[in-house]
Amino acid sequence: MNKNKSSQWFQRACQVIPGGVNSPVRAFKSVGGNPVFIERAQGAYLFDVDGNRYIDLINSWGPMILGHAQQDILNAVEEAIHKSFSFGAPTEKEVLIAELICEMVPSIEKIRFVNSGTEATMSAIRLARGYTGKNKILKFEGCYHGHGDSFLIAAGSGAATTGVPDSAGVPQSIANDTLTAPYNDLRAVENIIDSNPDQIAAIIVEPVAGNMGCVPPENGFLQGLRNICDKKNIVLIFDEVMTGFRLAQGGAQQLFNVIPDLTTLGKVIGGGLPVGAYGGKKEIMDYISPSGPVYQAGTLSGNPIAVSAGLATLRYLYQHNEIYVQLEQITQNLCQKIEHNIAKTGVKATVNRVGSMFTLFFTEQKVTNFSSAKTSDTETFAKYFNLMLEKGIYLAPSQFEALFVSAEINQEIVEYISQANLESLRKISAMM
Ligand SMILES: *Cc1c(COP(=O)(O)O)cnc(C)c1O
C-alpha cells in the first residue's frame, strides 16, 4: 500500500502542529508508523490522499452512525449554508432539535447546546456544583469525559481517595476535588462517599464505557449508582457523548432503563459537525444563566450549520428506529465471527460489545474495568492494527478504544472484515 503523500503531509504537519495532529489519538504513536491523511469519505469507506480505500470502523470516533456523506444530512447542510454561517442569535432549528431530543432521551426535560463533548461535561459539573452547593465529583478509572481539568485525574495510590493530575498543567488543587473509583465497583463508590460526607456534588459515568475500550456496565451497576445518588443527594450524570443516539434512540439510559439527573451529549448529536449538549431535569437546568446563577455561554453555540446536520441526523434516527436493530444484528454477527477466529487461531483475546460498539482486547481476562483492560498486550494490538490497515480496514490506532459500526456496513463487508481478521490472527499466532 502506497502511503507516500500521507507521509509527506505528516512531515509538513509536524513542523506546524504539535505532534502533527489536532487530537492526540489520531497520531499512530501506540501502533507505530504515520497517520494516513484522509481526502474524502463516502458510505462505509474512507479514501486517503494516496488513493487508498479503507473500510471505516472509527466513523469519526462515533458521529457517523449513518455512514459518510449521507444524502439527507448533505441536503440539510447544503440548504443551511446559503443562509449564512452564524448569527449569534436564536434560530428555529435550535428549538426543533431541543424538542426532538427532549422527546427521544428519557431524562431530558431541558437542554443547552455547546460545541463539543468536553464543553458539555465541564458545564454539567459546574451546574451540579452550583445546584448542590458541594465541590467534589466522583468519576471512574478508565472513563473519559473530555479534556477539562477536573477529569484529567488518575486514581491516587493505595487507600488515598484523592486523585492525582493525569496531565501536566492540571493543578493538584483541582485534583483534590476529583475522586476516582474502579468501574463496576459499587462498594468502592460507597466507601468513597462515606469518607467524604456531604461533599460530593456529582457522580459522572459513561453508562457503557467506551474510552478504555468497550466495557459494559455489570448488572445492577447503573441502578446502584442511581440509588446511592438518591440517598445522598448527589447529581447523577450519564456522560452519553459516545452512547447517546448510538445504542438506542434514547441512549444507554433507555437501553438499561436507568434515569440520570443530567446527561451530556456530543458525537452523533452533530452528525459529524461540532455539537455538544447537556440536559436533564428542569429544576436543575433552570440553574443555568440567564435563568439561574450558574454561568455558561458560547459565541458559536447552536451554530446553524452544525445544528442543521444534527437535526437531520436525529430526525433520520427518530424515523428509522429499525436502524438500531440492524446495527445490533450486524455487529453481533461480526463479533461472533471474530470470536470464532480467536478460538480457531488460539490467540489470547476477548471481545466486548454493546450494540454497535465493540473492542477486541488482546487479553485472556474478562475485561470489566480499567485494570483488566490494561492486561491487554498492546504490542500484539499494534501488529494487529497494522495488518488490518494493510488489508484496507481502518481501526482506532489504540487498544483502548471502541470501534463503531455504521449503518453502511453490510453483510458483504462483515465477511471481508472477518476474513481479514482471521488472516491477521493467524499471522499473529505464527509469530508467538
Ligand atoms: C468523546 C467523548 C468526550 C469528549 O468529547 P469531545 O467532543 O471530544 O470534546 C466526552 N465524553 C465521552 C464519553 C466521550 O466519548
Image: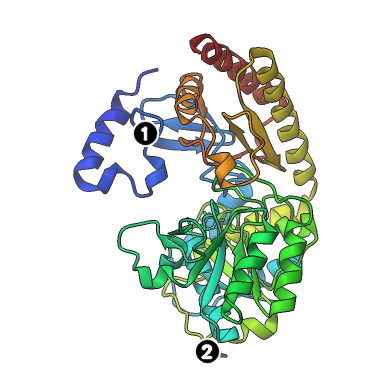
Q: Residues within 10 Å of mark 1 (few under 14, many from 20)?
A: some
Give whichever of 132, 200 is nearer the camera.
200
Q: Is residue 164 left or right of residue 322?
A: left
Residue matched to label 2 = 290
Residue 200 drawn at (x, y percent): 58, 76
Residue type indicated by callout 2: Pro
**Residue at horizontal 72 percent and vertical 43 percent from the top:** 355
Q: Is 99 situated above or below 20?
A: below
Residue 416 drawn at (x, y percent): 63, 19
Residue type indicated by callout 1: Pro
Q: Is residue 227 left or right of residue 175?
A: right
Q: Is 328 situated above or below 267?
A: above
Q: Residues within 10 Å of mark 2 (few under 14, many from 20)?
A: few
Asked if the residue at label 1 sits under 8 Å from ligand 1, the reply is: no
Q: Quadrant of residue 312?
A: bottom right
Q: Quadrant of residue 223?
A: bottom right
Element type at marker 1? loop
Q: Quick one: quadrant of the N terminus?
A: top left
Give whichever of 207, 120 is nearer the camera.
207
Residue 317 drawn at (x, y percent): 71, 53
Asked if the residue at label 2 sits under 8 Å from ligand 1, the reply is: no
Residue matched to label 1 = 35
Q: Is residue 98 left or right of residue 155?
A: right
Q: Which residue is at the far front?
A: 159
Q: Earlier in the sequence, mark 2 or mark 1?
A: 1
Residue 79 drawn at (x, y percent): 54, 59
| Residue 303 shows up from this direction | no
